[in-house]
Image (cartoon, helix red, strand yellow):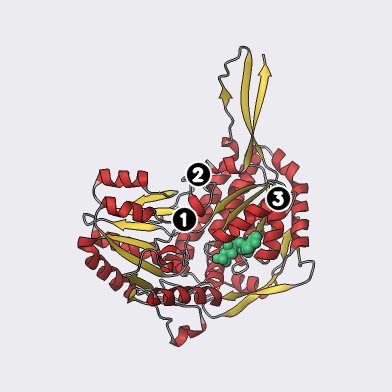
Amino acid sequence: MGQRVALLPAVAQFLGREQKLLIGGAWVPAASGETFATLNPATGRPLTQVAQGAAVDIDRAVQAARAAFPAWAALLPAQRERLLHRFADLMEEHKAELAQLETLDNGKPFNVAYNVEVNVAIGQMRYYAGAPTRLTGETYPVSSPGFLVYTRREPLGVCGAITPWNYSLVMATQKIGPALATGNTLVLKPAEQTPLTALRLAELALAAGIPPGVFNVVTGFGDTAGAALTAHPDVNKVAFTGSTDVGRAIVRASAGNLKHVSLELGGKSPLIIFDDADLPAAAEAALWAIFANSGQNCVAGSRLYVQRRVYDTVLGELAARAGRLKVGDGLEPDTSLGPLISQRQLDQVLHFVEQGVAGGGTLVTGGQRPGGDLAGGYFLQPTIFGGVAEDSVIAREEIFGPVLSAFAFDDEADVLPRANHSRYGLAAGVWTNNLSRAHRLAQHLRAGVVWINTYDWFDPAVPFGGVGESGYGRELGSQVMDMYTELKSVWVKL
Ligand code: ADP
């Protein structure tokens, strides 16, 4: 067994100072002077105080972003590329710091933050750093004589990014990268539960030479700072990742100036295991599909469908594996499941567990809070329900915690409509060795992403987003450039 992760001096220093807002290249307190505490969910204790930005601070940040926009948009593509690569280089140099801040603020295992998430964030920045010189238009073969017609991709102007607390760093780079690469300027409002990595990123962006005002960060609460950003008349686009209800509020708020909106929202994703699959591998995938990040994952495979002949075997295997997962502080070396983000989140998830039991579901494993040393944090054991009614609350609603509902099915025709019976449509997984069946399901599952014989893989080159109440627009991939640019058609009479 290894050692508990020791805090880096740079992290201790960062936590030792009150965190301010980054507006127009200057670190400033909120106009109101108010601050709020960000808590360590493993202990419930404050990590540091953060400026509580509100509408007036958002307005200042938007003005700074507007002022910085013309010069940033006019930079040569290669110059923007160089700055974004330098930013990615600095992220790489400060990788361990970013990972420690993510673990402290969110609770997730340090190994995951360090070995997976920071690398994903850096990969995204590098992918988008290379984008400015690849941002092309097209020419069109019009059916009138004597014309040259082509399109140009032009930046939107000032973008707002509103990010959630579950993968704060990755969600931030996913939006900073394409926004800045396409020549927009940005105001980022990170989740109030996990503001720290966004603030550290902003320090690194400044150090990389990204000009003042191009990337601004306003920390604060959703219904004040967040709402002001989405309603601001001089913001041209809002990119949001978060809950479906807030997504709806953002669409309403965006109507004033008809700003662009892209929404990556909730999910209740099905994972389907057929009896011909590699069952141990499928059980391991199903385990992490739901328990990664303690289930606080928009693509969590929270509805598990197992073909009836192997249902008991797979569920037994899954429960055994879940029982071996170590719940604990993310800084402990053998932790595989950290705490939930907050007392509120824990209470909500426990309420779902109660509803599951009251509705006649069978608790196969978990459902309890661990005691002892962990009593002060927001921990919950990995939880698996069998025998759940398919129209019950826990089978339909996004729980955003380590709670799985498992169902048996007969065959493909039986499972497909059941898997598709959801108002969400973010992700789906299929485990089978039948090639035709795999592709048939990939075609007919109603989801923005389908994983076959794997789950929860991402790459900066691959578009990501949902259908139905999981949102609209796509993140990642080269297609995201469409979401951050206007297409202008130019007609030339030759
Ligand atoms: P959760 O309910 O899991 O905390 P939310 O969707 O509420 O997820 O939060 C995601 C992000 O949206 C956070 O940055 C939060 O501050 C922000 N937010 C919450 N409410 C609003 C709102 N009304 N307008 C804009 N942003 C909001």
Q: Which mark is residue 214?
A: 3
Residue 406, x across and y down, in percent: 33, 66
Outermost residue to the bottom: 372
**Is 227 displayed left or right of 33 in the figure?**
left
- Residue designated by label 2: 477
Q: Residues within 10 Å of mark 2 (few under 14, many from 20)?
A: some
Q: Are marks 2 and 1 in contact (CB under 8 Å)?
A: no
Q: Is residue 340 above or below residue 125?
A: below
Outermost residue to the top: 145
Kind of residue sitting beneath label 3? Val
- Is ligand 1 closer than 8 angstroms to the Cβ of mark 3? no
Viewer-side label of 3, 1:
1
Task: Give me the residue at 58% from left, 36% from top.
Answer: 135
Q: Is residue 51 visible?
A: yes
- Residue designated by label 1: 424
Kind of residue sitting beneath label 2? Gly
The local secondary structure at tag 3 comes to: loop
Q: CA distance from mark 3 to mark 1?
A: 35 Å
Q: Quadrant of the C terminus?
A: top right
Residue 106, x across and y down, in percent: 54, 70
Residue 98, x across and y down, in percent: 56, 64
The local secondary structure at tag 2 comes to: loop
Q: Nearer the viewer, residue 259 or 211?
A: 259
The local secondary structure at tag 1 comes to: loop
Q: CA distance from mark 2 to mark 1?
A: 22 Å
Q: CA distance from mark 2 to mark 3?
A: 22 Å
Task: Give me the residue at 62% from left, 29% from top.
Answer: 151
Q: Is residue 4 visible?
A: no
Residue 311: quarter of image: bottom left
Residue 401, x across and y down, in percent: 45, 69
**Of callouts 3 and 1, which one flags the residue occurring earlier in the amino acid sequence?**
3
How many numbered callouts? Answer: 3
